[in-house]
Amino acid sequence: MMPALTLGIEEEYLLVDPQTRDLVSEPSPDFLKDCKDRLGEHVTPEFLKCQVEIGTPVCTDISEARHHLTALRSVIINTAEKHGMKLMAASTHPFAQWDRQKHTVAPRYNLLDKDMGGAIRRMLICGMHVHAGIEDQDLRIDLMNQARYFLPHLLALSTSSPFWGGHDMAMRCSRLGIFDSMPRTGIPDRYESWSDYERMIGRLIQAGVMEDASKLWWDMRPSAKFPTLEMRVTDVCTRLEDALCIAAFYQSILRMLARIKQRNMRWRIYPRIMLEENRWRAQRYGCTKSMIDLGRGDCIPFGSLIEEIIEMISEDATALGCLREVQHARMILKRGTSACRQIDTFAQAKAAGADDAEAYISVVDMLVHDTAADLPDAP
């Protein structure tokens, strides 16, 4: 049987001071209380106080995910404005300094601070995670092994972190370079079965280096809480439509892999070093250059690879009711990701006579605007 492939989407946002455009390092405690009054368990604090995280309920399809993600973004934006702040969906802030931020006081975060030291304190980054429901544990591992191939492609479509601490990093995604200072990150290894995976988890727990599987921070992992395969490689998308595209792409890829498995076929498993090379190219160039087609062994323009994937998964996207969202990838390629738009906004401001500080403020203003741009009541 095909897995259910239900969807759950998590996004992390940044809270911005509308006057300085810097981050709000100490938001009013009433902000999160007001959010929770309206959204309950679907909003949570993050390690840093300048961040907030939302998570949709379990969604049967992309239409339901659209409804919930739209509502969640709208409530957080409106509540932030009520408390004198703006909301920004980007994986890094263009000029904020990590060492000026304060971490949330809670047992989980206190333990992370104690265990990780400076690595966790630098985590002034935001991501987007997509859960896909796969009930069978061995199938979950099998699909993870195969779907690893597509992680760089999903990352390239999502990039939103070209700047870091007031520096142009010459990267479309600088977030992963920061995140990879944590242990147990990156593209996961191949596992033969669920039992093989559990044995590895057991060894790490027995060694005392982690408490449970939630301390695996891979780009893709079996969720420690839900019967899902959780994709974690992507930057948070500034625009809502881009986020829904990523979720639909991921869901459709998994269905395609499950479908061909029913015909006793499978995606070829490539060495991790080759997958990591494409991951690096996604970090460096996003959707603007090429990636290695590992079957051909050549670098191919990224747009051509995406067209091939769209053709490959169109049957599955149609069956899942998300073909329109999958085809939105063409708009991302045409318009550019958030990272592309940030770089262009900075360059345009500089060309108009702005200094670096003024140009970064222009980038923040663009991000705040675009975070709400696809919502029904956006100005």
Image (tube, rainbow, N blue to C red):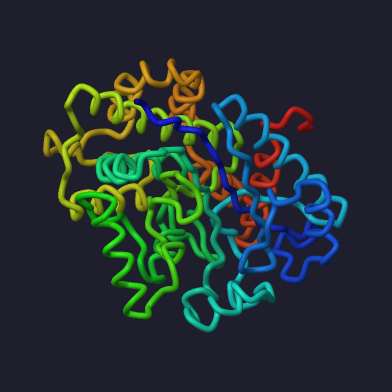
Q: Residue placed at 32% from the left, 68% from the top?
A: 202
From the image, which quarter does the C terminus lie in?
top right
Where residue 173 sits in the image (x, y, percent)?
43, 53
Where residue 96 sits in the image (x, y, percent)?
62, 67
Q: Is residue 311 left or right of residue 299?
A: right
Q: Residue placed at 16% from the left, 37% from the top?
A: 268
Q: Is residue 320 left or right of residue 287?
A: right
Total marks in image:
0
Q: Nearer the viewer, residue 327 or 18?
A: 327
Q: Is residue 156 above or below residue 284?
A: above
Inspect this view and state whether residue 282 appears: yes
Where residue 275 sits in the image (x, y, percent)?
23, 49
Q: Is residue 115 above or below residue 348?
A: below
Q: Nearer the viewer, residue 13 or 37?
A: 37
Q: Residue placed at 41% from the left, 35% from the top?
A: 250
Q: Is residue 361 above or below residue 77?
A: below
Inspect this view and state whether residue 101 appears: no
Q: Nearer the viewer, residue 244 or 189?
A: 189
Q: Is residue 143 left or right of residue 321?
A: left
Q: Is residue 18 above or below residue 373?
A: below
Q: Residue placed at 48% from the left, 60% from the top?
A: 168
